[in-house]
Amino acid sequence: MAEKIGLFYGSSTGAGENVAHIIKEEIERSGVATVEMRIVSSDTLKVMEEYQYLIFGCSTWNIGELQDDWDVKFNELDIVNFNGRKVALYGNGDQYGYSNTFVDAIGMIGNKIAANGAEIVGFWPADGYEFEFSKGAFEGVFMGLPLDDDNQPERTRQRVVNWIYWVMEQFGMPMPVPEAA
């Protein structure tokens, strides 16, 4: 039986949800695992404990703020037992309009859950992005996948696909590489 992955996301404009659908589609097409998508604000976060493997998606809003669904649940992350769980993060942001807070949500959530025992996977290089500062980046690496649909929408799908192959390998569930046509 395939592993289950819990994908918790928030979405105000649809960008975070669109990425969640791409992730689900890619993983389930491989047959390696199933993905259960959940809007993070729709239930108690204790349900996260039902999953060994988690993917969190949160956009950064305004000047370094969490997207609304995550904002209302952020402190509830403290009651979740993340010990032994692997968690991958992705987030949408605007690297030009908000270059001092680009995808801060990745770092805000990542630092909180790491302090509560989560093993963060899916780190992504900062190459190809132009920003001044991000709570989600350090030493040239992001704590998860940064996406910028405002300025680089043509790169989103391929970045997500590449990242999910990397995440699944780190989850210990490598996905077969599709044969070239």
Image: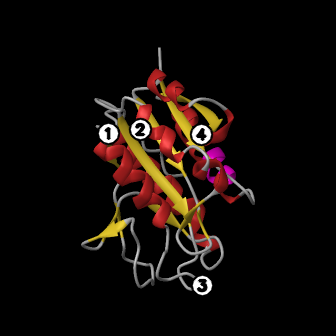
Residue at 66% over, 76% down: 150
Q: Does the magenta stretch mainly form a helix, a strand or a loop?
A: helix
Tag 4–tag 2 contact (CB < 8 Å):
no
Which amino acid does the dot numbered 2 rest on? Asp
Which is in the foreground here, disc 4 or disc 3? 3
Mark 3–mark 1 Cα distance, whole angstroms, equals 32 Å
Q: Which residue, given by chain and number where applicable, does mark 4 sit on?
A: 24
Which amino acid does the dot numbered 4 rest on? Lys
Sequence order check, earlier mark of 4 and 3: 4
Mark 3–mark 2 Cα distance, whole angstroms, equals 31 Å
Sequence order check, earlier mark of 3 and 1: 3
Sequence order check, earlier mark of 4 and 2: 4
Tag 4–tag 3 contact (CB < 8 Å):
no
| Horizontal arrangement in the rendering, residue 39 relative to residue 141 (left or right) | right
Residue 36 falls in which quadrant of the image? top right
| Horizontal arrangement in the rendering, residue 122 relative to residue 27 (left or right) | left
Q: Position of residue 107 (x, y in %)?
A: 40, 60
Q: Which residue, given by chain and number where applicable, does mark 3 sit on?
A: 97
Q: Is residue 65 above or below residue 121?
A: below
Q: Secondary structure at mark 1?
A: loop
Q: Which residue, given by chain and number where applicable, does mark 1 sit on?
A: 116
Q: Position of residue 80 (x, y in %)?
A: 42, 31
| Horizontal arrangement in the rendering, residue 145 relative to residue 42 (left or right) | left
